[in-house]
Image (tube, grey):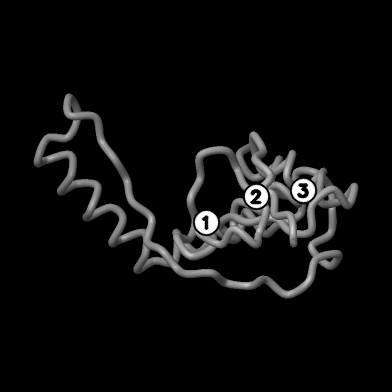
Amino acid sequence: GLVVANIRGANYDDAFMADDAIHKYWTKDYRQSLRMFMRKRVHAVVGPENGILYAIQKLGLSSDIFGKPLVLNKKKAFLFFSKKTADDKTIADLRTTLKIMEEQGDIKEIFACYRSSPQKLETQGE
């Protein structure tokens, strides 16, 4: 009987999507989902943690208003290339760069930006 905001066309977990006892309310983005949550029009918001946390920050909300997240699953992120740009050298260079960024902690630092205050996010690129 719960209503969960879910971005239109997104499937984060097969079991969740197949559960007809959970009503999915389709939204255009996380901001709309969170606004509906704040207005008590939905009981929960589903999506990747970093995306939801970023939208919370951009809306100026505190993540303290939410309960503990229920992790449905963990998935790897993928990069997709156009067939016109996906040559072997570009893919090899990207793999090497990502490995170096991971080893140096750059990737964790990038994701940490999504958990920073809105003011910090806006000034980091300056």
Disc 2 from disc 1: Cα separation = 8 Å
Disc 3 from disc 1: Cα separation = 19 Å
Image coords of residue 51 (percent x, y): 60, 51
* Comes first in the chain, label 2 or label 1: 1
Residue in the image at 63% along x and 56% along y? 46
Instruction: Determine which residue is flagged by label 1.
Output: 17
Instruction: Determine which residue is flagged by label 3.
Output: 34
In which quarter of the view is residue 100 placed? bottom left
Instruction: Say which of 54 and 20 sits in front.
Output: 20
* Comes first in the chain, label 3 or label 1: 1
Would you call the spot at circle 2 few (<14 residues within 10 Å), some (14-19), or many (20 or more)?
many
Residue in the image at 11% along x and 40% along y? 89
- Dot 1 falls on a residue whose secondary structure is helix
How many numbered marks appear? 3
Disc 2 from disc 3: Cα separation = 14 Å
* Comes first in the chain, label 2 or label 3: 2
Instruction: Determine which residue is flagged by label 2.
Output: 24
Amino acid on which the number 2 mark rests in the picture: Lys
Image coords of residue 58 (percent x, y): 75, 44
Kindly give the residue lying farthest to the right in the view shown.
39
In which quarter of the view is residue 69 placed? bottom right
Image coords of residue 48 (percent x, y): 56, 57
Amino acid on which the number 1 mark rests in the picture: Met
Instruction: Say which of 2 and 100 sits in front.
Output: 2
Are circles 2 and 3 on residues that touch, CB within 8 Å?
A: no
Query: Quadrant location of the N terminus?
Result: bottom right
Kindly give the residue lying farthest to the top in the view shown.
84
Kindly give the residue lying farthest to the left in the view shown.
88
Amino acid on which the number 3 mark rests in the picture: Leu
Would you call the spot at circle 3 few (<14 residues within 10 Å), some (14-19), or many (20 or more)?
many
